[in-house]
Image (cartoon, grey):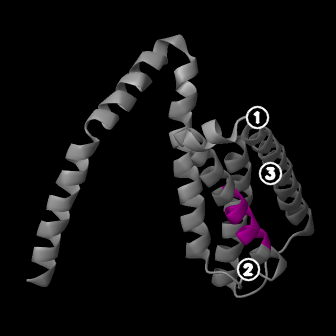
Amino acid sequence: MFVYLISSVAGKYLLIIKQNEEETGKPYFEPHKLWLCGFLSAACYAFLFYFSINEIKEFYRDPLAYVKEFFNWLDLLCFGLNITFLTLLLINVMNGLDVIDIHVIRTVGALAGWVMWIKVFYWMRVFKNTSYFIILINRTITDSASFIIMFAIIIFAFANYNFIL
């Protein structure tokens, strides 16, 4: 979560730079603020490197158990999205903010943030007051999975019918 928050600060600053450039028509680079983005990006990469080392250690302890756990896949997805988001931001900064469409960067950042908030539910299982509710939600979703799939098929069938009309 901390990595996403840091990269969001850097990303928000870069979006402000982009908006100022579009409004004024001239580059809006201030070296001291770019150092701030560089420092925040380096901190994010350091945290992500530390996170990846921990995930690799956990994988080598018991590979089969690691692959079976849903939240490990969620961790890997989170890691990939955060690295992608941060790298896309840095590519745009190094090349004058015109290489990658800003909407693509925002979409990847939004997905990274959404996955990080899902991980918050995983960590809420640690606390006694919230663990019961998280386990209850998890069991409810698991028990109703077949109904959710059937309901989604019905919704898509009617959506397809209405789309064709």
Kind of residue at disc 1: Arg
Query: In the figure, 10 relative to 102: above or below?
Result: above
Q: Tell me the residue at 58%/47% (across/down).
A: 73
Mark 3 or mark 2: whose residue is earlier in sequence? 3
Residue range in magenta is: 82-90
Q: Position of residue 40 (x, y in %)?
A: 83, 53
Q: Which residue is mark 1?
A: 61
The C terminus appears in which quarter of the rendering? bottom left
> Could you say which disc has been placed on residue 44 in the image?
3
Tag 1 near tag 3, CB within 8 Å? no
Secondary structure type for disc 3: helix
Among all residues in the image, which is located at the extreme bottom?
25
> Could you say which disc has been placed on residue 97 in the image?
2
The N terminus appears in which quarter of the rendering? top right
Q: Position of residue 98 (x, y in %)?
A: 71, 85
Tag 3 near tag 2, CB within 8 Å? no
Label 2 packing within 10 angstroms: few (<14), some (14-19), many (20+):
many
Q: CA distance from mark 3 to mark 2?
A: 20 Å
Q: Nearer the viewer, mark 1 or mark 3?
A: 1
